[in-house]
Image: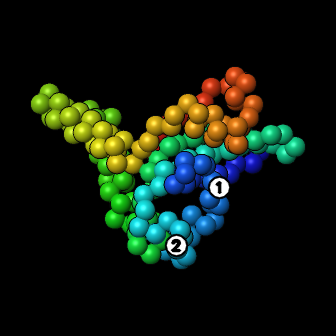
Amino acid sequence: MSVWRRYLVKDVSGRLVDLPSRLLDRADDGTAPLPAYAGRCVEVVAAVLVGDRGAPPRVAEMEFTKLYFDQSGFVDAAKRERMIRLMLESCADRRGRSAGPRLDSDRMARRAGAARDQLTREFGWDPKPAELNAVLSRLDPARLNGASPAGGHTLH
């Protein structure tokens, strides 16, 4: 079984275009910018596909995220760090419960909820049904026929 990533970016016209993972990786690690995205926030579909040789690939996971680029066309490191911090904060109420007072649990739950809300507002987007169908028709056409449920919408 093979596993690989696919990225689709919503361009200014709303059309989904492929973004090869090697190009995104290079913009993320600071080795080669993507000038077309310089200074922009773009909506990205990040998908993990699995497949056996000779069989059509299937979407194992699908995320709808916003990705920020700096003025040079590299993935914005400060925004990436903020996203990671919010992701960690959003898990505060899911960590093992201590024997501490209930007030600490309530405070952690409020903090985690606020981080999840901010993470969704700043780094997530909800596809319209037509956008979701367009993604599935490109990445996993069998799923459109009801063969299996859609993947999760967690943020990365």
Can see residue 70?
yes
Q: Is residue 39 left or right of residue 33?
A: left
Say which label, 2 or 1, has the lower sequence index.
Answer: 1
Q: Amino acid at mark 1?
A: Asp
Secondary structure, mark 1, is strand
Residue in the foreground of this view, choosing between 22 and 130? 130
Q: Which mark is residue 139?
A: none
Q: Amino acid at mark 2?
A: Pro
Q: Residue furthest front?
A: 13
User: Which residue is depicted at the point 47% across and 55% down?
Assistant: 42
Residue in the foreground of this view, choosing between 72 and 27? 72
Q: Is residue 132 left or right of residue 96?
A: right
- In which quadrant will I find the N terminus? top right
User: Which residue is depicted at the point 63% across and 65% down?
Assistant: 22
Secondary structure, mark 2, is helix
Q: CA distance from mark 2 to mark 1?
A: 16 Å
From the top left corner, tell me how far across and down residue 98 is, in percent: 22, 34
Q: Is residue 112 left or right of residue 69?
A: left
Dividing the picture into quadrants, the one containing residue 129 is: top right
Dividing the picture into quadrants, the one containing residue 11 is: bottom right
From the top left corner, tell me how far across and down residue 110 is, in percent: 20, 34
Rate crowding at label 2 as few (under 14), some (14 to 19) or many (20 or more) other CA atoms within 10 Å: some
User: Which residue is depicted at the point 34% across and 48% down?
Assistant: 122
Rate crowding at label 1 as few (under 14), some (14 to 19) or many (20 or more) other CA atoms within 10 Å: some
Compared with 4, 127 (above or below) is above
Q: Is residue 35 left or right of residue 136?
A: left
User: Which residue is depicted at the point 53% across and 77% down?
Assistant: 31
Q: On the image, numbered disc 1 is attached to which residue?
A: 18
Q: On the image, numbered disc 2 is attached to which residue?
A: 35
From the top left corner, tell me how far across and down residue 28 is, in percent: 50, 66
